[in-house]
């Protein structure tokens, strides 16, 4: 054989042996103790929560039923409100206390009968000083000034008939809300102003409205007089001065129980305005609430002074006014006009006018406290016929067939226990049957 053939055969044989060795190596199993590594990211897992160990059972006791899995509440995410370039808006607080008890006429009369001379309380002055006005009205309006902690004490408030809660900022406690609510529910009259709007809404959420209105700017507001009786005192409009911004409109739930005395359009920002009530009154259980948007300390005109006197008289006669309203409604009548005034020695007569637009029955009710006073009411028809009655407490003159036209009614003070003795005259018409 030739040498070149021997070399070729040797090369082929070596190659064959090498290939067989590779195949043999690949086909061998991995020896024990060796680990094959892969470049693969291991998944991240959360270890399971350890299960609570079962309590040992007493011998012979039946096995306990497994506890159901806990319910998980999911809260739906609400969309974010749109941010708009608007003035400060005061949202009404959301509170849901127990509903007030319904009061009957006999219960209200019993509450009034138990009270003697009215006892007045005033919160400490801050932005407002109602005590100064009460002192100017005379001895019959003596009052007790209460500290903030006393306002939170229902037993302390129970000693008074009228509470003047004048404008003041600061925190509102649950004790204050509960105390004010109990005070009014038991027959008290609450007068509150401006920044006290929030606590009034929280104490009486039944009267709060969901409507949002901005707080007012500083400046003068010309208010329209809505109430016929107040219109006799002030005229059709009255100018109110707000010396600081951020004051609150008298915003409460609309309805027949809310009496709206004043309404005005006011500035709430650059070039923006809002319209709302500025003075309201509403009954609650056995008591009453009066709210004003303005301060008495910043009103200096003669007309505005009449308004403030009206507010005080409204507060101190609120019980009698409520009693008259319930009596009329029970008899099928609806109050159409209420006149609030006062009598003093040397100024013993007050005369007003009622425009009767349709012929039919009328009631003229004179309301005042039984506190040593004696008053006379004279009702004169358009033709000059008179009906006269006098008494030591609230009474009513009935006119079964009142003619259309202008009726005059005059209150004469025969005896008053103190100057500026307050009284109210309410005229009611029969409610037509539907």
Image: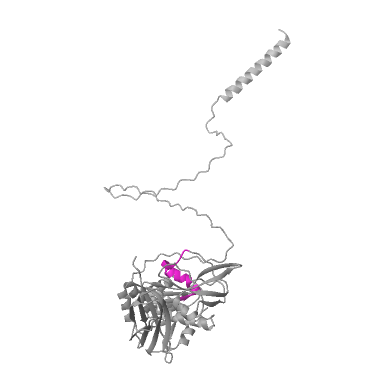
- Image vertical order of residue 15 relative to residue 46, above or below: above
Q: Magenta segment, principal secondary structure?
A: helix
> Where residue 132 sits in the image (x, y, percent)?
49, 84
Identified at 58% across, 24% down, the residue is 25
* Furthest-left residue in this view: 60
- In this picture, which residue range is highlighted in magenta? 192-210
Quadrant in the picture for the C terminus: bottom left
Say which of 97 and 84 sits in front.
84
* Furthest-bottom residue in this view: 346
- Image vertical order of residue 361 relative to residue 43, above or below: below
Taking the image as drawn, is residue 307 in sight? no
For the rendered model, the colour scheme is one colour
Say which of 335 and 53 sits in front.
335
Taking the image as drawn, is residue 259 in sight? yes
Say which of 117 and 50 sits in front.
117
> Where residue 104 sits in the image (x, y, percent)?
31, 72
Residue 317 forms part of the magenta stretch: no
> Where residue 384 sits in the image (x, y, percent)?
38, 84
- Image vertical order of residue 170 relative to residue 391, above or below: above
Identified at 54% across, 75% down, the residue is 222
Quadrant in the picture for the N terminus: top right
């Amino acid at each position: 054989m030739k040498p070149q053939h021997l070399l070729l055969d040797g090369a082929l044989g070596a190659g064959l042996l090498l290939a067989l060795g590779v195949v043999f190596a690949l086909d061998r199993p991995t020896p024990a103790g060796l680990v094959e590594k892969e470049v693969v990211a291991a998944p991240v897992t959360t270890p399971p929560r350890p299960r609570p160990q079962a309590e040992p059972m007493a011998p012979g006791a039946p096995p306990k039923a497994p506890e159901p899995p806990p319910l998980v509440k999911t809260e739906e995410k609400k969309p974010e409100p749109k941010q708009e370039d608007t003035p400060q808006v005061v949202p009404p607080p959301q509170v849901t206390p127990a509903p007030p008890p319904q009061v009957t006429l006999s219960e209200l009369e019993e509450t009034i009968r138990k009270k003697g001379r009215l006892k007045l309380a005033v919160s400490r002055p801050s932005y407002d000083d109602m005590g100064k006005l009460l002192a100017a009205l005379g001895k019959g309006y003596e009052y007790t000034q209460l500290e903030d902690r006393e306002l939170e004490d229902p037993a302390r408030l129970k000693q008074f008939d009228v509470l003047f809660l004048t404008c003041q900022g600061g925190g509102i406690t649950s004790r204050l809300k509960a105390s004010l609510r109990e005070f009014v529910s038991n027959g008290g009259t609450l007068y509150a102003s401006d920044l006290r709007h929030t606590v009034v809404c929280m104490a009486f959420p039944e009267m709060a409205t969901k409507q949002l209105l901005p707080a007012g700017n500083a400046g003068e507001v010309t208010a329209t007089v809505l109430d016929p009786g107040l219109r006799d005192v002030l005229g059709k409009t009255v100018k109110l001065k707000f010396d600081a911004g951020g004051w609150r409109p008298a915003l409460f739930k609309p309805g027949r129980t809310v009496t709206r005395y004043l309404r005005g359009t006011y500035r709430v920002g650059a070039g923006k305005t809002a319209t709302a009530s500025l003075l309201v009154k509403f009954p609650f259980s056995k008591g009453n609430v009066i709210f004003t948007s303005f301060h008495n300390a910043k009103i200096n005109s003669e007309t505005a002074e009449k308004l403030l006197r009206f507010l005080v008289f409204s507060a101190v006669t609120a019980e009698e006014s409520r009693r008259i309203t319930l009596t009329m409604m029970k008899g099928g009548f609806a109050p159409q006009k209420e006149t609030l005034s006062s009598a003093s020695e040397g100024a013993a007569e007050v005369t007003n006018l009622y425009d009767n637009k349709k012929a039919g029955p009328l009631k003229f009710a004179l309301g005042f406290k039984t506190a040593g006073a004696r008053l006379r009411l004279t009702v004169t028809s358009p033709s000059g016929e008179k009906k006269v009655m006098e008494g030591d407490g609230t009474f009513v003159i009935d006119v079964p067939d009142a003619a259309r036209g202008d009726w005059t009614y005059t209150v004469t003070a025969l005896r008053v226990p103190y100057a500026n003795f307050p009284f109210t005259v309410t005229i009611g018409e029969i409610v037509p049957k539907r």
